[in-house]
Amino acid sequence: MKNSRYTFYFILLLSFGLLSCNSTNKTYQIESPNHNNILTFSLTEKGEPQYNLSHNGKTVIKPSFLGIEFEDVKAMTSGFEVLNVEKNTVNTNWEQPWGEFKTITDNHNELIVHLKETKGNNRLVNLVFRVFNDGLGFRYAFPKQDNLNKVKISNEITEFTFPFDNDVWWIPVHAENSYYESFYRKTPISKTDTINTPATFETKDSLFVAIHEANLTDFASMTLLKTNNNQYESNLVPWADGVKVYAETPFSTPWRTIIVGDTPGDLVTSTLMLNLNEPSKIDDVSWIEPSKYIGIWWGMHLEKYTWGQGEKHGATTENTKHYIDFAAKNGLDGVLVEGWNVGWDGDWTADGTAFSFTQSYPDFDLEEISKYAAKNNVRLIGHHETAGASKHYENQLEDAFALYNKLGVNAVKTGYVNKFLDKKEWHDGQYGVRHYRKVIETAAKYHIMIDNHEPVKGTGLQRTYPNLMTQEGGRGQEYNAWSADGGNTPEHTTVMPFTRMLSGPFDFTPGNFNFDYKTPNNAMVQTTLAKQLALYVVIFSPLQMASDLPENYEGKPEFEFIKEVPSIWSDTKVLDSKIGDYTTIVRKDWDGDNWYLGSITNKEPRNLKVDLSFLNANKKYTAIIYADGDVANYKLNPYPVNISKQTVDNQTVLDLKLAAGGGTAIKFTPIM
Ligand code: NOJ
């Protein structure tokens, strides 16, 4: 995580007019290091700040206004002059403690425009632009100043104006639920209203663009309000009282990010969001352990067990020991146990103030189980469901984490199943942002990793707090147990890598092996078994679950893949993909030279040619291939998997045959 190799950092403080271009119309420009992306900043006649962005000569964002409005003082949207500008270049590498890449290059050019109001209070704001080869990040930085101190932001008017009514993959804001658990839909911009980020655009001139944000700290989430057929404006999620953000100078907004690529895969391998977050605040990361886990979890969603007390209580000492035995036997690192603590009886979703995070149910002996887990070299994974009662949780936070720390628990899954936090605030407003940060920071103090369900969207904070391992914030496997719409469509996971996954790791919980269950809504996993395996490569999560019941894995040769597949990667490449149709992703093991491939399709069967040129040219590899069997089909017969072995090298082109709703998973091991 420390800066490594080499750093160029030079600052040119240039007074107004000396920089590039043109002093009369006050235009400033910087390019990405590879010259592909060009950012232009200008002030209009009325002193309104504007920016635009191009990629290889194509307009990505047309001139778009920037500015902030306040509840009780004049807006800062016009009447500016440029005091001076700074230009910096950074080219540095940094190491991740875990991720989809071991080493990340931060190579960007920066333009800082110092603006001052020409009249009235002469207030100041700096606009900071960073242009990378993979896109643009920019933020507002308000310096400490006499005439702007405590503020209530009522609106951010950052515009994103496209040249066309492009197609966009989007989910609605708060309309279906408060935590991003919606299907992405693809429509022209003109057919949307207010959408969440990441929002992914397929442009009319064949670019792939994603708008999102980075380093969401003590601010409200940005959503996008359609203002005309080609344009969105930042729409901050408000507090219950209508204020968007309470702030005090000096403060900065999160970075507004625009990834630009020529292929869908360029979005996936972009590192812009991570580069725009602060380096780690945790010096000793030795206790942060990416891992795979099983859990007393799917049983509740299938109604085999209950979270609350009674005959079907899942979290019993005996049952947990059985899960620990299974994990130990199969080399899985953790066992999640939900429903272990007081507060689940009755309708636990309604309130949440009955939850104790230190008191277990009488049939769950926390101490004994922790000892049993340690003896078997398995970790218990803690669970804190709050039902949205975040204050109630905060009051117990220190005690709860201290208890887990004492017992050797180093990962906790948190949950916030409720439309609101504390009955009135959004998960993704400044209130929620503050709460989630408090949990992450307190957890770090007790050496605890967090897997956060019903979260605020990810914005790359795992760089600063590498104990923020993974989040939900999307429709996960659980929908396949109870969703009234029948579960996740086969298309869903072919969209995720290019949308939800751009915000960071996803605790989707793949690994379903049994398709013969019945639940009241007749929901069903709509994939083949081979596709479940491929999801371990396609969906990145450093805490990765094997979601099915242990008995469904017993004796299954396909389980070998889940046992072996890593949960973190030193390198990632996206091969040929079409959003919503199919994707093929290859990743290299964090430790060692093995590569893994995951290829998935939507409901259409598909033959794909996969060029293995990513493999090391000087080696031969054994490929163990888990492919859909001839008659496999997600609807009719998801089970058949052909497991075969083949010697390959980087000249090989593999023919993959994906069934309807199917996939292929491959492990490549170098032959010594
Ligand atoms: C919703 C979570 O996503 C799920 O994984 C969990 O089992 C339930 N809440 C209960 O906490």
Image (cartoon, helix red, strand yellow):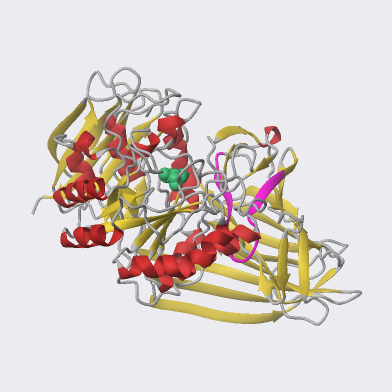
Question: Which one is in front, 283 or 189?
Answer: 283
Residue drawn 35% across the image and 43% down it: 297
Q: Residue furthest left?
A: 672
At which x and y percent is residue 548? Answer: 29, 38
Residue at 24% over, 55% down:
333
Q: Can see residue 318? A: yes
Residue at left offset 78%, top offset 71%: 23
- Left or right of 297 in this view: 116: right
Q: In which quarter of the image is residue 549?
A: top left
Q: State ligand 1's quadrant.
A: top left
Residue situated in front as seen by the camera: 440 or 350:
350
- Give how far across and how far down residue 168 sits, in percent: 60, 38
Q: Can residue 267 be seen in this view?
A: no
Split into 4 quadrants, where in the image is the N terminus?
bottom left
**Residue 619: percent from left, percent from top:** 15, 52
Viewer-side residue, 662 vs 478: 478
368 relative position to 218: left or right: left
Which picture quadrant has residue 240? bottom right
- Name above or below for residue 158 compared with residue 395: above
Task: Tell me if residue 506 is in the magenta stretch.
Answer: no
Q: Position of residue 113 (x, y in %)?
A: 70, 72
Is residue 65 positioned above or below 599 on the image?
below
Q: Nearer the viewer, residue 368 or 264?
A: 368
Question: In the rendered structure, does residue 223 fall within the stretch colored magenta?
Answer: yes
Q: What stretch is highlighted in magenta?
A: 206-225
